Each structure stands twice: as structure tokens, then as C-alpha cells.
Image: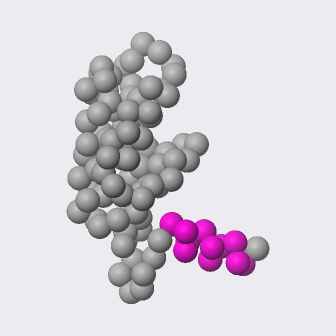
């Protein structure tokens, strides 16, 4: 299972607040059925790589549907295939070492 961290920043909105865009993106992510965690500077999502990439496209395009003139999307993907991985497992591994 892959894990994706995504951040989409709308630009050219005429306002410094982006929470309405983030709320729209969380709704889209919920509808995907994928497990996710909202973070202060982005969102982590886990699932099949093809579904993650499809979701990334929908999230990127959502800022334009909401009126932004420009969107800047940053994506990090951890696609581990030698053993099962999850967001919870990754956090537990680090916490166990603290």
C-alpha cells in the first residue's frame, strides 16, 4: 500500500485564507473512501497507487473549480512493496524508538 502526502495551494484568490479550499479538498478525499489524516500543512492518504494519483488530480483541479487562478501542488509518495506499510505503522515505528 502506498502513502501520499499532498498539499494544494490555491493562488490568485484575492484572499490570504485558504480554509474553504482545504474544506472542499477534505470532502473530495472523504468521498474517495481512502484512509486519510488531515495535517496542518497538508494531508496524508494511504491506498492503491493508482487511486492516490487519481485523487491527486482531482484535488489539484478542485482549486480551479472553486475560482483560483493558479494552483501549486506538492506530492510525496512512499510506495513500499517489500512489506505492508501504513500511516499508523510508520508513526508507531518512530514512536517506538523515542
Residue found at x 36% / y 47%: 29
List the single residue furthest toward the bottom: 82
Residue found at x 30% / y 58%: 52
Work out whether residue 76 can be spotted.
no
Q: Please state the horizontal and vertical placement of residue 31, each as a whole percent of the image.
A: 32, 46
Q: Main secondary structure of the magenta part?
A: helix
Q: Please state the horizontal and vertical placement of residue 96, each as a whole percent of the image.
A: 70, 78
Residue found at x 51% / y 19%: 16
Q: Is residue 45 above or below residue 12?
A: below
Q: Which image quadrant is residue 93 in?
A: bottom right
Residue found at x 23% / y 53%: 54
Range shown magenta = 87-97
Q: Is residue 47 above or below residue 82?
A: above
Image quadrant holding the N terminus, namely bottom left
Q: Is residue 46 above or below residue 5?
A: below
Q: Is residue 56 left or right of residue 76?
A: left
Work out whether residue 57 can be spotted.
yes
Q: Please state the horizontal and vertical placement of residue 21, each as a whole percent of the image.
A: 41, 29
Q: Is residue 56 left or right of residue 87?
A: left
Front-lying residue, 51 or 17: 51
Amino acid at each position: 500500500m502506498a502513502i501520499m502526502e499532498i498539499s494544494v495551494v490555491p493562488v490568485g484568490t484575492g484572499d490570504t485564507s485558504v480554509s474553504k479550499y482545504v474544506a472542499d479538498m477534505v470532502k473530495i478525499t472523504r468521498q474517495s473512501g481512502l484512509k486519510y489524516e488531515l495535517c496542518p500543512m497538508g494531508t496524508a492518504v494511504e491506498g492503491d497507487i493508482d487511486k492516490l494519483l487519481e485523487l491527486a488530480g482531482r484535488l489539484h483541479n478542485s482549486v480551479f473549480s472553486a475560482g483560483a487562478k493558479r494552483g501549486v501542488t506538492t506530492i510525496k509518495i512512499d510506495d513500499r512493496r517489500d512489506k505492508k506499510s501504513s500511516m499508523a505503522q510508520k508513526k508507531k515505528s518512530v514512536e517506538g524508538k523515542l
